[in-house]
Structures are given as structure tokens and as C-alpha cells.
Amino acid sequence: MSIAAGIAATKATLDLTKIISDLVKRPNIDAADVQAKLHEMLIHAVNAQTALGEAQQEITELRRQLDDQEASRATQADLEMDPLCRYYVRKSERERGLIPYCPTCWRTERKLVPLTLLQHPGSFMCAIHKVKFASPEHLEQQKQLNANAAEASRARTVRTSWMG
């Protein structure tokens, strides 16, 4: 039932109140007619109450959705994407230490899911999507390990050369 239906039921109740009042003022009161009009008035009052209750529920739900949207906008404004690592961090957490958040969870479900630390320093994974991320420190460490491995490989190649 809509708010318009509740207003119409309330108007019908008021109209019936006038009719009943006129019926009661007559010298020959028809009790059955008054009883029928009172019953009809109660039906309209219940319909009005039902419509207003449903409207209240709808208003409550719309307010909750609005609050959720405002909270989501505030969270979005607080998030920034780490350009190197591709995960989100909150600007408001800078002083306490940044917590990495899964960008997939935020984009698809609007949920902030902290990434799980797999390896120190800074290899992370989303527990829901199983996507792995690496911090700048971890990327630097991997870069250094790769450089050391390449250097060792070159050194072995130079020493074991058949020409040398």
C-alpha cells in the first residue's frame, strides 16, 4: 500500500465520521446502518495504519541506503591506489601504518577486505579472490634477487666458457 492509499483511507475515515455523526443525530436511529458505517470506518483506519507502517519501513530502508552510500563515498575519498603495488591504502591510516586492501573486493562489492600477509617484507594475498600483491619493499627485494641470480649466471658462463 502506498502513502496515497493511506491518505485516501484516512479521508474515507473522516468522511464516514461525518456520515455516522449525521446518522446518530436523526430521531430514528438505524442501529444496523450505524454499525455498518462504524465497521467500514474501522476498515479504512486499519488500511491507513497499514499504509503508514509500510511507508515508515520504506523511509527507514531508503535512509539506510543513503547512509550506506554516504559511508561508501567517504571511504572512497579516503582510499588511494598504490600505483606500484595495485592495492588500496587508506589515507587516514598513514600515521598508524598502512594496511593494504583488496581493490577487487572494493570495486565489486564495496567491501574493504584487508590483504593477508604471506611473506615478510610485503607479499600479500586476498583471502577471497586469491589474488597476490607485493609491496614496494618486496618488489625491490625480488629485483635484487633477480639481479644477483643474473650476475651469478653470467659469472658461471664466463668461467665455464670453452674459449676461455
Image: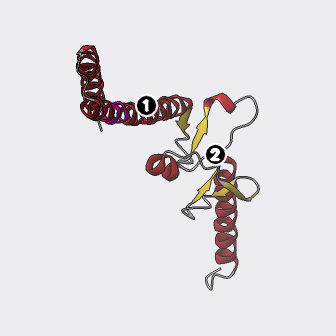
Q: Earlier in the sequence, mark 2 or mark 1?
A: 1
Left or right for 137, reference 38: right
Which residue is found at the position 31% from the left and 33% from the top? 35
Q: Is residue 103 above or below residue 73?
A: below
Residue drawn at (62%, 61%) of the image: 127
Quadrant of the rendering where the C terminus is positioned: bottom right
Q: Nearer the viewer, mark 2 or mark 1?
A: 1
Q: Which residues are magenta?
A: 41-46
Left or right, 33 with respect to 121, comes to left
**Amino acid found under the numbered disc labelled 2:** Pro
Place residue 27 in its image quadrant.
top left
Relative horizontal placement of residue 157, taking residue 20 as reference (left or right) = right
**Place of residue 99 in the rendered image (x, y in percent of width and height, measured from the top left):** 68, 42
| Residue 140 against residue 98 in the figure, above or below | below
Q: Which residue is mark 2?
A: 100
* Residue 45 counted in the magenta span: yes
Please give left or right for residue 65 compared with residue 132 in the image.
left
- Between 61 and 10, the residue placed more toward the observer is 10
Residue that carries the numbered disc 1 in the rendered image: 56
Measure the C-alpha gap from mark 2 to mark 1. Answer: 40 Å
71 or 162: nearer the viewer: 71
